Image: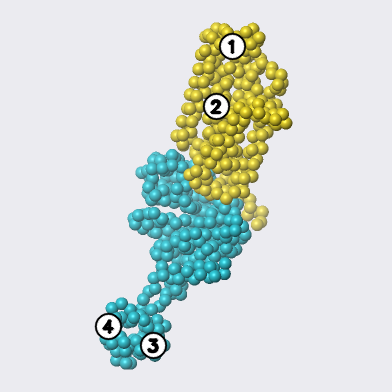
Chain colours: A yellow, B cyan
Amino acid sequence: MTAPAAAPAAALAVPFSRTVHAEWIKFRSLRSTWYTLAGLGFAGLGITALGMSTVGVDYANLTAAERADWDPTNQSLTTYLIAQLIIGVLGILVVTSEHATGLIQTSLAATPRRHRLLAAKAVLLTGVAAVTGQALMFISFFLGQTMLAAQGVPNASLGDPGVLSAVLGGGVYLTAIALLAVGLGTILRTTAGALVTLVSIVFLVPGFAGLFPSGLAGILDFWPSQGAAAVLTTLPNPDYPYPWLNLGGMCLGVAAVLTVAFVLFRRRDV
Amino acid sequence: MNRIDVRGLTKRYGPDTAVDDLSFTVEPGQVTGFLGPNGAGKSTTMKIIMGLASPTHGSVTISGRHYRDLPVPLTHVGALLDAGAVHGSRTAHSHLLALAASNGLPARRVGTVLERTGLTSVAGKHAGGFSLGMRQRLGIAAALLGDPQVLIFDEPVNGLDPEGIRWIRGFMRSLAHEGRAVLVSSHLMSEMAQTADHLVVIGRGKLIADTSMTDFMTANGVGTVLVRCSEPGVFARLLTAAGATVRDGPESSLVVSDLAAGEIGKLAAYHSVVLSELSPQQASLEDAFMELTKDSLEYLGATS
C-alpha cells in the first residue's frame, strides 16, 4: 500500500461525531427512552416531594444534637438512590437491547471498528446522564428547599458553603453510574443479568455492608450508595473528610469495568 | 476490483469445526449462489466476511481489504444476514436514518432505498409490526443504503410468499446486471437454479464444488435418455449389447444411460425398431445437489 493510496482513504473515513450522531438517532427514536426519562422525572421528584412533606414534623421532634447534624441539602438529594437505578437502566438498554434484537450485527456491519461503536455509546450516555442527572439534582434541591421553607424548617440556598459542590457531585455521581451500566450491559449482554448486577452493586452490597470483614470494608469507602455518595452532604463527615476523593475512587472503578467491557466487546463474536 | 476473496478460512468452536479450510471468490457482475445443507457453515462464513466473527485461521478480503479496514463500510458492502436484526420499536425510517448517519451518508439515501424496496408507504411504521417479507425488504433497504458494489444475503427467501420470492429473485439479478458482486446463500438447489450464475457448494464447512451454474448442470446431469418403442424387451437387449445400461422406466419405457440419444436412434434405425419417444432427461438439480452433499457426508463420516 503506497502512501498516496492511503491518504484519500483516511480522508474519506467516517468522523467519530457521525458515529455518536447515529447513536443519538437510535436513542431518541425509541419511545422507551422517553418513558424512562419521564419515569426518572416523576420518581425523582415524587420522592423529593414525599420525603420533604413531613420533614417539618420530624424536625420538631429532633434533639438539639440531632439538629446540629441537620443537612437540608442532603435531605433533598436522596432521590439519587432511585435516580441511579433509572439512569442505569438507560445505560444498560443502550447496549443490551441491541444484543436482544440482533441489531448489534447491523450496527457492527455499519461500524466495524468496535471500540468506536462502544465509545460512541459511552459518549452518548455521558451526555444524557450528565444533562438529565444534573437537571434532576438541581430541581430536587430547589423543590426540596422550597418545601422546607414552607414548613418553616431550616433550609439551604445554593450559595451556602458546600451546597453547590453537593448538587454538582450528584450529577457527576449519576453520570458515573450510567457509564457503569454501559459497561455491565456490554459485559453481560442481557438486560436481566446487567440489571440484577447493577441492583446488587447499588443496593444489595451496601445493605450487607455490616457483614463485610474489615479487610474488605475499606472498598465501601468508594462504593456507590456508600462512601462515593458522601459528596452529596454539606456537613463535614469524619469518615469521609475528602468526599470528592471517594467519588473519584468510584469513577476509577467504573473506568476499570469499562476497560473490561472494551476488551471483551472487541474480542467476542456477535 | 469489487470482489470477495475467501482464503483458507477455518472456524472452530471448541472441538467443532464449523468452517474447514474454505477458499472461494465472489466475482462482480454475477450472482454467486452459496449452497449447502443447514448447518454447513454458510452463515458462519458470512459472519466472518462481515467481521462479526473472527476466523481461527485464514482470511477474507473485500476488494483487497479486511472488512474492518473499509473506511466507509456501507459504501463497499451491503448485507442482509438476519431480517429480524432490527429493533421492533423503531420505525423503518429511523432505523435506516441511524445507519445512514453512522456512515456519514446523506439522509436522502433513506428515501431512495425505501422507494427501491417498496417500503415508502410504511416508512413511519414500527418495524415490530412488519411481516417477514417486509422485514426482508427493510434488511435489503439497509444493505443498499451506501449503494455498495458488494452485496451479501443470507437465505433471503426464507419464509417468503411466492410473490416475495419472485421479487427477490428479480432483484438479485438486477443487482448483478448493474455490475455488483452478489453472494446469496440458500439450502435449496432449486432456488439457486433460478438466480445464480456461479455456485459455491459446501458441506460440513468444506468446499464441495466451486463452478459455473452451466458446468455444474452438465457435470452432474446423470444424462439418461427415455426411450419408448414397440418391443422394449428386444431393444433393451440390443442396447445392452451396444454398451448401454438399461433399466425399466414408467409405462414400459426404457431408461438408458451411458449411450447418447443420437447413438440410440442410429441403433434403432439399424435394427428397424420403431421408436415412439426418444428424450434426453435433464437431471434435476436438487438430485445432483443431494448426490454431492451425500457423498461428502459419507466421506466425512467414514474418516472422522
For the image, the number of numbered tags is 4
Circle 2/circle 3 CB separation < 8 Å: no
Q: Report helix, strand or loop for mark 2.
A: helix
Protein chain holding label 1: A
Circle 4: residue type: Ser
Q: Residue at x 60, y 58 (%)?
A: B15
Q: Nearer the viewer, residue A52 or A128?
A: A52
Image side of residue A241 versus residue B297, left or right: right
In the rendered image, which residue does mark 1 sit on?
Answer: A155
Instruction: Give the label, 2 or 4, closer to the camera.
Output: 2
Circle 2: residue type: Ala
Q: Report helix, strand or loop for mark 4.
A: strand
Q: Earlier in the sequence, mark 4 or mark 3?
A: 3
Mark 1 surroundings: few (<14), some (14-19) or many (≥20) residues within 10 A: many
Does B275 appear above or below B128?
Answer: below
Task: Residue B57: give x, y in percent of width and height.
Answer: 62, 59
Marks 1 and 4 sit apart, C-alpha to C-alpha, by 110 Å
In the rendered image, which residue does mark 2 sit on?
Answer: A83
Q: Residue at x 46, y 72 (%)?
A: B215
Task: Residue B81: give x, y in percent of width and height.
Answer: 48, 53
Image side of residue A264 versus residue B170, left or right: right
Marks 2 and 3 sit apart, C-alpha to C-alpha, by 89 Å
Residue B199 visible (yes or no) = yes
In the rendered image, which residue does mark 4 sit on?
Answer: B276
Instruction: Give the label, 3 or 1, closer to the camera.
Output: 3
Q: Nearer the viewer, residue A194 or A44?
A: A194
Protein chain holding label 2: A
Marks 2 and 1 sit apart, C-alpha to C-alpha, by 23 Å
In the rendered image, which residue does mark 3 sit on?
Answer: B240
Q: Is disc 1 on the same chain as disc 3?
A: no
Marks 3 and 1 sit apart, C-alpha to C-alpha, by 111 Å
Q: Nearer the viewer, residue A143 or B245?
A: B245
